[in-house]
Image (tube, grey):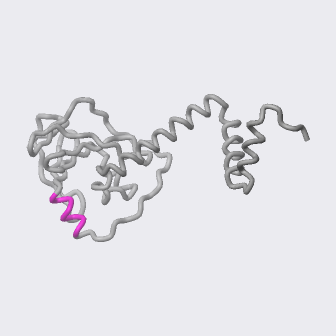
């Protein structure tokens, strides 16, 4: 099988975790994990570990823009966003369900305990949550730019207080009133 990234190098079978075998590229260090090998590994592994929250560490992942072909069945690989403050996308074959991971992607997923949840990343539910996360971050950036960071934090604090208050409706009406009573 040829590397989907380098497109020239042959992949070599290697154990990347105890009992998890993948085809690895000697040139770019990418990894092809077949669906069958991954499922066997999950079955042996047993318990899925809880996700580790993101830290602020920089993740260096090479970016590739060209469409890639599955090294097994030659279909175009589909890119899936990981989300959860992980900047890269994972390539997956919609035909054979194999997964291509570029250099450092497996290690990054492993550092966050997401390596045992690859199958969940490809679900509609996961992808919808990634989209919601991106929308929240975009709105946060827009509001910070519009109000300034300090005022944005004040507004968030006030909003949180107001929403938990038993008279939140009345407070909102007062705030929105163009001619509120001056007390």
Of 13 and 154, which appears nearest the observer? 154
166 horizontally vs 113: left or right = right
Q: Is residue 42 above or below residue 16?
A: below
- Residue 41 belongs to the span the image colors magenta: yes
Q: Quadrant of residue 87?
A: top left
Residue at x 31% of width, y 34% of height: 63
Report the number of discs.
Answer: 0
Of 34 and 181, which appears nearest the observer? 181
Q: Quadrant of the N terminus?
A: top left
Residue at x 9% of width, y 45% of height: 72
Residue at x 41% of width, y 63% of height: 50
Residue at x 74% of width, y 36% of height: 176
Q: Quadrant of the C terminus?
A: top right
Q: Quadrant of residue 47?
A: bottom left
Residue 13 location in percent, x, y?
12, 53
Q: Quadrant of residue 74?
A: top left
Residue 95 location in percent, x, y?
14, 46
Q: Is residue 160 above or below residue 20?
A: above
- Residue 14 belongs to the span the image colors magenta: no
| Extreme-right residue of the structure | 183
Q: Main secondary structure of the magenta part?
A: helix
Q: Is residue 36 above or below residue 100?
A: below
Residue 6 location in percent, x, y?
17, 35
Residue 12 location in percent, x, y?
12, 49
In the image, which residues are magenta?
36-43
Of 89 and 126, which appears nearest the observer? 126
């Amino acid at each position: 099988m040829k590397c989907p990234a380098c497109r020239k190098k042959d992949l070599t079978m290697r154990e990347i975790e105890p009992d998890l075998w993948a085809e690895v590229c000697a040139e770019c260090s990418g990894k092809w994990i077949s669906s069958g090998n991954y499922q066997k590994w999950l079955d042996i592994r047993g318990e899925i570990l809880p996700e580790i929250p993101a830290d602020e560490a920089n993740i260096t992942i090479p970016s590739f823009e060209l469409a890639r072909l599955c090294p097994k069945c030659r279909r175009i690989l589909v890119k899936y966003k990981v989300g959860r403050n992980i900047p890269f996308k994972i390539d997956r074959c919609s035909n054979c369900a194999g997964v291509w991971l570029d250099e450092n992607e497996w290690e990054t997923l492993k550092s966050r305990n997401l390596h045992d949840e690859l199958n969940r990343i490809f679900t509609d539910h996961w992808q919808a949550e990634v989209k919601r996360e991106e929308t929240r971050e975009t709105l946060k950036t827009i509001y910070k730019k519009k109000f300034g960071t300090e005022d944005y934090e004040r507004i968030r604090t006030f909003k949180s207080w107001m929403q938990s208050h038993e008279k939140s409706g009345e407070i909102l009406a007062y705030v929105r009133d163009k001619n509120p009573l001056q007390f």
